[in-house]
């Protein structure tokens, strides 16, 4: 039972009934040779072929296929993830004929429990190998029609991200539950034995009720809390922090303190600790490409919203270390490179882009530089950001033209694309109808104002889309390159059993937009840190060639992720 090796080999894996079918593919995606693999032998067979030739595995979805392979100790080098690539190639606007959309190629929500090894009762693949082959061939036609090669790079990076997401869940983020408990007790107060509110939360809640004159007020009821605030003259439209902080009243301080503790309690309190941390590991569910810009999302565990106060609980195992790295001002650096704005690239040279903006003479202080740059990327027109953005147009005309043009296209109902070709969603029918209705001769001025406001909102979205999406692409390549380099390191002298398939190997343990945490054997910490730096340099070159843009890292080798 074998498939003959081939140069740059590609093998499609399809679960059909109780067996897995492996199909050797030609460069154009045509089937060359087919092998039926009994379900009980899949992991062994895939592992053997992987070691022998490192093919590119064409799979429906890493989320569906990879976890059982990891549980069996099999790691894949590279894949073409049909679900992830379908979403890109269906919506891309950089080729004349994008992929035809199909509801069969929408991702499904991940199961709550661990998957069985190719469980025939939970099939998630199409009805036949022919459908998988047809989809892959269609995707290859779109990729091949892009003469720049950028879509090919994006699909490869997105597919690698699918593998990384499952590997990070399998290996887990080292988490000290006792330290987490200590932080909760210190911040919230002792855990109530019979449920209810911790002591520090209760103190703030009592103060809020006292100032509102209602000892039985349910503070977690938004409607009731707003009514109580209005009764004492606090006339706010919401209980958001930014709106409350503008008000001067004795109730504000305890209310803001209560809301902060309440968020910690509900999002990462004792119940979260019990559900999501087991055997010293936090294993969230990542969703690569879960945001339209290509950023990741999470559907379980809230990995992307873990508060910084809990970082001391991220703690390496004995004999292991954490390599923590994040990029300084990634998005404006991407903007400078996308626009080939050498003046902005000069400001980005070194660790602090905002200091470089000040040195250029565009603004007077670092704070003004930050407001101006963020305002440029997010379309600010009012406040300090709106006042400062015009200054950037004089100093960095190419960068500002890039985002201004993206905003104009968005306002006109057009589509914009990232550096590698991920495109923004088209406006929906309601948006188009509203804009069309606002152009008549006898239109109500209020309707015109509403249509223009929605158009400006869409312009702000497309303005940021090209920058945030390109930053997400850089981060994907960074992840893939880190993963590639870590796989070259030898086995650890001291194992970390809770890391499952990575018990003896340095591995990526956490990712958040522009930050990574690696869990590595202590003796390999320096080598792993070098891998992270080298991967950043490669990601920059892959995207922008020789354009002189610095993407510096803040990198630490530590026992805990506390900063």
Image: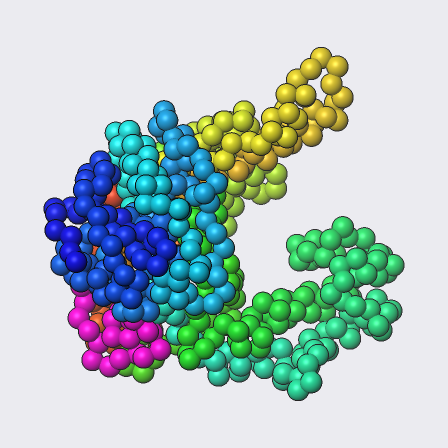
In the depicted structure, whether residue 149 falls above or below residue 182: above
Q: Quadrant of residue 165?
A: bottom left
Q: Quadrant of residue 322?
A: bottom left
Question: Does 146 lie within the magenta span?
Answer: no
Which residue sits at x=40%, y=60%? Answer: 120
Q: Quadrant of the C terminus?
A: bottom left
Question: Does 493 lie within the magenta span?
Answer: yes
**Residue 518's x, y, as percent?**
32, 67
In the depicted structure, whether residue 231 falls above or below residue 462: below
**Residue 153's x, y, as percent?**
28, 42
The reply, left or right, for residue 227 in relation to residue 517 is right
* Front one among 439 and 54: 54
Q: Residue furthest bottom?
A: 193
Model colouring: rainbow
User: Which residue range is magenta in the image?
Assistant: 487-511
**Residue 132's x, y, as percent?**
34, 43
Q: Quadrant of the N terminus?
A: bottom left
Q: Residue furthest top?
A: 441
Which residue sits at x=47%, y=75%? Answer: 277
Which residue sits at x=37%, y=55%? Answer: 17
In the depicted structure, whether residue 346 falls above or below residue 65: above
Q: How many marks?
A: 0
* Front one among 508 and 386: 508
* Front one among 366 and 91: 91
**Residue 204 seen:** yes
Which residue sits at x=39%, y=57%? Answer: 64
**Residue 557 seen:** no
Q: Quadrant of residue 321?
A: bottom left
**Residue 80's x, y, as percent?**
30, 47
């Amino acid at each position: 039972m074998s498939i003959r090796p081939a140069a740059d080999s590609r093998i499609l894996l399809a679960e059909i009934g109780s067996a897995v079918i492996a199909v050797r593919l030609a460069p154009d995606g045509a089937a060359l040779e087919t092998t039926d693999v009994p379900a009980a032998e899949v992991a062994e067979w895939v592992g053997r072929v992987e070691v022998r030739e490192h093919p590119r595995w064409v799979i429906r979805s890493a989320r569906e296929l990879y976890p059982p392979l990891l549980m069996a100790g099999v790691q894949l080098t590279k894949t073409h993830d049909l679900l992830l690539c379908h979403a890109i190639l269906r919506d891309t606007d950089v080729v004349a004929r994008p992929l035809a959309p199909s509801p069969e190629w929408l991702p499904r929500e991940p199961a709550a429990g661990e998957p069985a090894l190719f469980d025939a009762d939970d099939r998630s693949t199409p009805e036949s190998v022919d459908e998988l082959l047809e989809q892959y061939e269609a995707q290859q036609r779109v990729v091949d029609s892009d003469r720049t090669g950028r879509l090919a790079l994006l699909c490869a990076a997105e597919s690698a991200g699918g593998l990384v997401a499952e590997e990070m869940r399998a290996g887990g983020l080292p988490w000290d539950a006792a330290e987490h408990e200590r932080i909760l007790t210190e911040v919230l107060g002792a855990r109530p034995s019979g449920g209810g509110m911790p002591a520090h939360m209760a103190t703030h809640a009592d103060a809020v009720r006292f100032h509102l004159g209602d000892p039985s007020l349910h503070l977690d009821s938004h409607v009731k809390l707003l009514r109580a605030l209005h009764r004492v003259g606090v006339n706010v439209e919401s209980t958001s922090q930014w709106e409350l902080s503008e008000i001067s009243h004795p109730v504000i301080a305890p209310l803001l303190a209560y809301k902060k503790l309440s968020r910690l309690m509900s999002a990462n309190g004792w119940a979260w600790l019990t559900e999501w941390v087991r055997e010293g590991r936090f294993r969230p569910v990542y969703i690569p490409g879960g945001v339209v810009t290509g950023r990741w999302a999470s559907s379980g565990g809230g990995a992307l919203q873990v508060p910084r106060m809990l970082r001391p609980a991220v703690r390496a195992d004995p004999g292991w270390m954490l390599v923590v790295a994040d990029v300084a001002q990634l998005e404006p650096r991407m903007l400078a490179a996308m626009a080939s704005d050498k003046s902005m690239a000069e400001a980005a040279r070194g660790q602090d882009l905002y200091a470089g903006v000040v040195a250029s003479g565009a603004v007077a202080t670092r704070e003004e530089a930050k407001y101006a740059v963020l305002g440029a990327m997010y379309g600010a027109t009012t406040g300090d950001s709106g006042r400062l953005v015009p200054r950037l147009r004089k100093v960095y005309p190419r960068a500002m033209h890039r985002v201004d043009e993206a905003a104009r296209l968005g306002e006109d109902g057009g589509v914009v694309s990232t550096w590698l070709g991920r495109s923004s969603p088209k406006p929906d029918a309601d948006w188009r109808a509203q804009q069309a209705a606002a152009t008549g001769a006898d239109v109500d001025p209020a309707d015109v104002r509403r249509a223009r406001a929605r158009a400006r909102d869409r312009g702000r979205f497309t303005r940021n889309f090209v920058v945030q999406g390109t930053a997400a692409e850089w981060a994907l390549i960074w992840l893939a390159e880190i993963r590639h380099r870590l796989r070259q390191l030898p086995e650890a002298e001291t194992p970390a059993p809770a890391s499952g398939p990575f018990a003896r190997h340095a591995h990526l343990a956490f990712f958040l937009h522009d930050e990574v945490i690696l869990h590595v054997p202590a003796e390999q910490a320096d080598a792993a840190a070098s891998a992270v730096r080298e991967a950043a340099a490669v990601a920059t070159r892959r995207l922008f060639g020789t354009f002189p843009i610095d993407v510096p890292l803040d990198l630490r080798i530590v026992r805990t992720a506390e900063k």
